[in-house]
Amino acid sequence: MLKNTYNYVINQYIKFLDLSFSKKFFVTYILCIVGYLSITLLGMYVNSLYSLKNADFIATKKFEIVSSAVVAHTGPEVSYLSLALTYIVNNFIACFTISSAIIAVALLYRHDIKKENDTNISYLNALFIFYLLTIINPFTGLSGAKLRYLDLIAVIPHGIFEFGAVALSISLGIHYALKILPLSYTLNLNSKKENVSNELLDNNANGANNENNADNNNKSTNISNIKNLPKLKLRDYINYIILLATILTLVSIAGILEPLDWALRNYSIANNINMIDLFIESYKNLIYYIIPGLIGDLLSKF
């Protein structure tokens, strides 16, 4: 039962990897939202039963470290700017780490292939595990375990951009991992190795010479295939930088909005104001009055 379920999930994941970049991003974006809500709601439920006192410890400490470094350079008098910069730096580092970790998986397996002429389906499993961990994002989800259900409204405005940045970083990592080491190559190599192994079992009675010949033939096949591994072109590096800049843009928008969202949430609680009405009215004013005013002031200086 478990094996059949695993095979089904892996097959679906292989189909996902065959999708275009934009479709990968869309699917990942939806799954990131679902994963965050699932872990957060689960954390809230468990917290209501057992009181998870240290549920947000890791997220809080990480924020405090980055915040202290940012404030040291911006000064305590610009607290909103320091908060926004903290969120931007913190989240961009997280997104960059996600994409880099996935790419590193491909680089490590590619290195093993070149060094040992050996790989197997574990490359697919590694990509799947990384994908699963990043879309579920247990640390971020558990950091919201102490929230109320209504407080999730405060996640929506900045979350639209933050989840977009995370989904884009995951898609970016997978896209370039498959460029560095295509999945079809490792699966084909694994298939060849299985065929050789079956032949060795069938012909075991023929002695050790046949076994050595088959192994040497397999190695020579692998060595010839190594030469066919793709290389990144200048266009790939340019596209990578553009996508990183896009992630930074999304993270920056989320970072600017996130302190505002939590300030509105705290204000509604302190003054017993309907949170939904407060968010609607605040963002309506932000969109129709504040942002156009700021743009007008900036343009007037040129």
Image (cartoon, grey):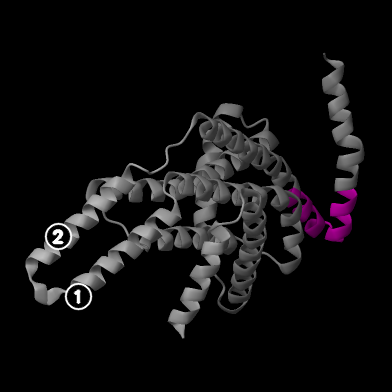
The first of marks 2 and 1 along the sequence is: 1
Name the residue that disc number 1 marks.
Answer: 201
Indicate whether residue 293 is drawn in magenta: no
Give the camera-side residue of 118 and 59: 118
- Please tell me how many numbered marks the rendered image carries: 2
Q: Label 2 is placed on what type of residue?
A: Asn
Name the residue that disc number 2 marks.
Answer: 213
Q: Where is residue 185 in the image (x, y as percent from the top left)?
A: 40, 54
Give the camera-side residue of 218 and 74: 218
> At 33% across and 48% down in the image, what residue appears?
225
- 196 vs 101, left or right, is left
Q: Where is residue 280 in the image (x, y as percent from the top left)?
A: 88, 53
- For residue 74, which numbered disc appears in the image? none
> At 79% across and 59% down in the image, what residue appears?
269
Give the camera-side residue of 160 and 49: 160
Q: Position of residue 86 (x, y in %)?
A: 59, 39
Whether residue 53 is visible:
no
Label 2 crowd (10 A; few <14 / some 14-19 / many >=20): few
> At 61% across and 28% down in the image, what residue appears?
74
Q: Label 1 is placed on what type of residue?
A: Leu
- 55 vs 300, left or right, is left
Element on which disc 1 rests:
helix
Label 2 with label 1: CB-CB less than 8 Å: no
Give the camera-side residue of 228 and 161: 228
Residue extending farthest top: 302
Q: What stretch is highlighted in magenta?
A: 261-282
Label 1 crowd (10 A; few <14 / some 14-19 / many >=20): few
Q: Main secondary structure of the magenta part?
A: helix
- 22 vs 214, left or right, is right
